Structures are given as C-alpha cells and as structure tokens.
Image (cartoon, rainbow, N blue to C red):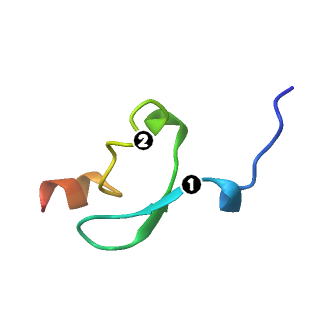
Amino acid sequence: MPKMRRKTDLPQKRCAECGKPFTWRKKWAKVWDEVRYCSERCRRTR
C-alpha cells in the first residue's frame, strides 16, 4: 500500500490571476509545471 501524504506536504503554487495559493491535484500530475490558474473561472478571466 502506498504511503499516505498530508495535504500540507503537497506542492503549492499561487494563482496567476487571483493570487490565492492552491495545492497539487492528482489530475494535474502530468502537467503540474504548466498549471497557472487555480480554477476555470480564473483561467477564463485572465
């Protein structure tokens, strides 16, 4: 069984639009370097 990680141990970034911090998500695993926005709303209003 894989070792569990706490949410505080995951990588974080700041949103380019609103400036809020957001944490890594599994669906972003392959493209984490390209992720710039915390949500679709921020991405649309860029």
What residue type is disc 1 on? Pro
Residue lying at 34% horizontally and 47% vertically, measured from the top left: 35
Task: Determine whether 18 is above or below 23 in the image.
Answer: below
Secondary structure at numbered mark 1: loop
The residues tagged by marks 2 and 1 sit, at their Cα atoms, a distance apart of: 10 Å
Residue lying at 52% horizontally and 49% vertically, measured from the top left: 24
Does 25 sit left or right of 16 as displayed?
Answer: right
Name of the residue lying farthest toward the left = 45
Q: Which quadrant of the figure contains the C terminus?
A: bottom left
Secondary structure at numbered mark 2: loop
Does 44 sit left or right of 33 as displayed?
Answer: left
2 or 1: tag closer to the N-terminus: 1
Question: Which dot marks residue 32?
Answer: 2
Task: Determine whether 5 is above or below 9 in the image.
Answer: above
Q: How many marks?
A: 2
Residue lying at 45% horizontally and 68% vertically, measured from the top left: 21
Name of the residue lying farthest toward the front = 33
Q: Residues within 10 Å of mark 2 (few under 14, many from 20)?
A: some
Residue lying at 44% horizontally and 30% vertically, measured from the top left: 30
Name of the residue lying farthest toward the top = 1
Which residue matches tag 1? 11
- Asked which quadrant contains residue 17, the reply is bottom left
What residue type is disc 2 on? Trp
